[in-house]
Image (cartoon, rainbow, N blue to C red):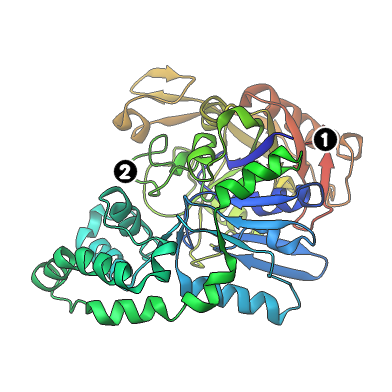
Amino acid sequence: MPAIVIVGAQWGDEGKGKATDHLGSRVDYVVKFNGGNNAGHTVVIGDEKYALHLLPSGILTPGCTPVIGNGVVVDLDVLFHEIDGLEARGIDTGALKVSANAHVIADYNRTLDKVTERFLGSRKIGTTGRGIGPTYADKMNRLGIRVQDLFDEKILAQKVEGALELKSQILTKIYNRRAPSVDQTVEELLAHADRLSPYVCDTTLLLGEALDRDETVLLEAGQATLLDVDHGTYPFVTSSSATAGGACTGSGIPPTRIDQVIAIVKAYTTRVGEGPFPTELHDESGDFLRNTGAEFGTTTGRPRRCGWYDAVIARYAARVNGVTDFVLTKLDVLTGLEQIPVCVAYDVDGERYDEMPANQSAFHHAVPIYEYFPGWTEDISGARTLDDLPANARSYVQELEQISGGRMSVVGVGPEREQAVVLHPLR
């Protein structure tokens, strides 16, 4: 059975957790392949609401094996805090698997993240301050600490000493911050080794054998396409590969075993952090979307920047990821609007762009070109088929499909698991 990839088509927070959970009963493995605890998924099951940050959404589905892949950076304190929280609510987390090759966030990387962001001032990226970027930098600089290193104290100490050799100078001489000692960092990491050990394995082998057995593997991205370190709105991006290509490197599954790429896109657009956002609203319409859609970060609680649907970035996401299916979420949030603007192209200094400008400066100065669609007032939360939707809501979905570069297979009409209109089965 080939693998399935789920990615975000905008700047994140599109509802990937719900889509993953929607597929969960038909999936044997759910793999988080990038990012760390700088992203969050909110999943609603009945009256229960779960906020996941580091754990894959499959942790909530009985019989499904959740996997933290090699492309993830792991804060062990956060990992076990999440595990304890779920266990206290009756969720069995014993099936979790963690790649031995995943990198670990050390205390000095959290400190560096926070002080660097403050130092940048007006040029700040808008990171979560959780040490994600510095840990990926260590990985690329070959100074990183991997999960497997926690089981060899001698190697762990050598690696921490090598990393701190430069970092202690940076922290003390540039930022006037006290650097942790080698012994302190090693002790903090080793404190988790015994508890972590049962979860650790060669996840690449695990997933390859699962696919050989004709089992279904779902690969879920943290963050989203426009935050991808290569294909996003650089430098206002995350530090990992959040597109379908990143699913291969972050899990060890080759591209020849992937046959479906599902992109999640909101019926409007949101963004957290700094960076250009052509359709952003600074008026009561933005407040309406934020408050009605509960647009506050799962991980940080920060209010999200809100704007109208942007078909240009949807088409870009479709192309970059090879999208086979879109899942449109939060259509219900638009209920009550008299008309709904949709960005179909950009104007940059008098020139029309129907596709994403290749130049960063052009995107920064892009002015949205809108088409306007009639709204609806009817409650759509109970809709389960396209015919259940009011005529204007139905037309809105069909128009978005025409201009977004891929078919709309599922439409979310509320936060709960079953609140969805299925136009085309995802599997």
Tell me which residue sits at (84%, 51%) in the image.
379
User: Crowding at label 2, few (<14), some or many (≥20) Cα neighbours within 10 Å?
Assistant: some
Report the mark closest to the observer, 1 or 2. 1
Q: In terms of depth relative to the viewer, which is nearer, 406 or 242?
A: 242
Q: Position of residue 276 (x, y in %)?
A: 38, 42
Tell me which residue sits at (18%, 79%) in the image.
178
Q: Position of residue 417 (x, y in %)?
A: 80, 56
In the displayed structure image, the side of residue 117 where residue 74 appears, left or right = right
Residue 174: image quadrant is bottom left
Tell me which residue sits at (81%, 70%) in the image.
47
User: Please, which residue is most extreme toward the left here?
Assistant: 173
In the displayed structure image, the side of residue 58 where residue 249 appears, left or right = left
Q: In terms of depth relative to the viewer, which is nearer, 27 or 327?
A: 27
Residue 331 visible in the snapshot = yes
For label 1, the residue is 425
The Cα atoms of the two marked residues, 1 and 2, are separated by 37 Å
User: Crowding at label 1, few (<14), some or many (≥20) Cα neighbours within 10 Å?
Assistant: few
Q: Position of residue 300 (x, y in %)?
A: 48, 67
Residue 333 visible in the snapshot = no
Amino acid at the residue labelled 1: Pro
Q: Where is 9 relative to 148, above or below? A: above
For label 2, the residue is 235
Label 2 secondary element: loop
Label 1 secondary element: loop
Q: In terms of depth relative to the viewer, which is nearer, 248 or 99?
A: 99
Point out the image quarter for the C terminus. Answer: top right
Tell me which residue sits at (64%, 63%) in the image.
96
In the displayed structure image, the side of residue 410 where residue 14 appears, left or right = left
Point out the image quarter for the N terminus. Answer: top right
Q: Position of residue 391 (x, y in %)?
A: 85, 33
Residue 134: image quadrant is bottom left
Amino acid at the residue labelled 2: Pro
